[in-house]
Image (spheres, rainbow, N blue to C red):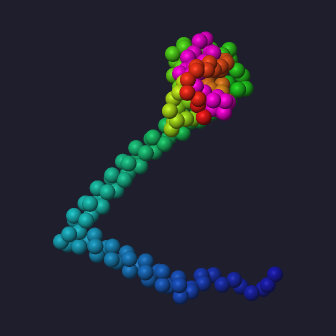
């Protein structure tokens, strides 16, 4: 170790002085702008109103964000709990299960025309219509993950060939 005393004064470079002067100049300009005797009151009122609005919007958005995060966390825990300790799978009513499956299909193929219909019977989903093999495989993987679905099958109806 060296016996030289440490210099407690901070290093003052020309760029530090420049930024300090620029900050003081900016504060002075802002003071003149807001403390102007003629228009300063109006400017302060507008600034106050904008800050109030920003605070209200921030509180509103924070509330939305916190609810969204809590719902997502709750969903993750429910999914994890069902995978770890699966309860007896309850099969929802047929019309509810059909709606869930249609919703899942809509997310998969939102741009393709619907060439088939969905029917549910006690957890068994039937895709009725023109469903080609590749699409059926893709849909089958997704539909099986819908809660309450026990089996997926398809019934081909003759008609124009689907690519």
Residue 150 counted in the magenta span: no
Which residue is depicted at the point 61% across and 11% down? 122
Displayed quadrant of residue 75: top right
In the depicted view, which residue is nearer to us: 1 or 158?
A: 158
Q: Is residue 18 left or right of residue 124?
A: left
Q: Is residue 67 left or right of residue 143?
A: left
Q: Is residue 50 left or right of residue 132?
A: left
For the C terminus, the image quarter is: top right
Residue 81 drawn at (x, y percent): 68, 26
Span colored in magenta: 117-139
Query: Is residue 79 at all visible to an observer of this figure?
Result: no
For the N terminus, the image quarter is: bottom right
Which residue is depicted at the point 58% across and 21% down? 158
Which residue is depicted at the point 30% across and 61% down? 47
Residue 85 drawn at (x, y percent): 72, 22
Query: Is residue 83 at all visible to an observer of this figure?
Result: yes
Residue 137 counted in the magenta span: yes
Q: Is residue 49 left or right of residue 155?
A: left
Which residue is depicted at the point 33% across and 52% down? 53
């Amino acid at each position: 170790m060296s016996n030289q005393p440490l210099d407690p004064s901070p290093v003052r470079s020309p760029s530090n002085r420049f930024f300090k002067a620029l900050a003081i100049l900016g504060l002075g300009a802002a003071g003149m702008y807001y403390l102007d005797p003629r228009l300063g009151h109006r400017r302060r009122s507008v600034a106050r109103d904008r800050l109030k609005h920003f605070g209200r919007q921030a509180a509103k958005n924070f509330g939305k964000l916190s609810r969204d995060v809590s719902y997502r966390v709750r969903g993750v825990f429910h999914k994890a709990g069902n995978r770890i300790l699966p309860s007896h799978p309850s099969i929802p009513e047929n019309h509810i299960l059909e709606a869930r499956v249609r919703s899942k299909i809509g997310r998969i193929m939102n741009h393709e025309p619907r060439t088939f219909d969905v029917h549910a019977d006690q957890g068994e989903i039937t895709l009725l219509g023109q469903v080609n093999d590749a699409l059926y495989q893709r849909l089958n993987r997704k539909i099986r993950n819908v809660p309450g679905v026990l089996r997926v099958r398809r019934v081909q109806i003759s008609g124009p060939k689907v690519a």
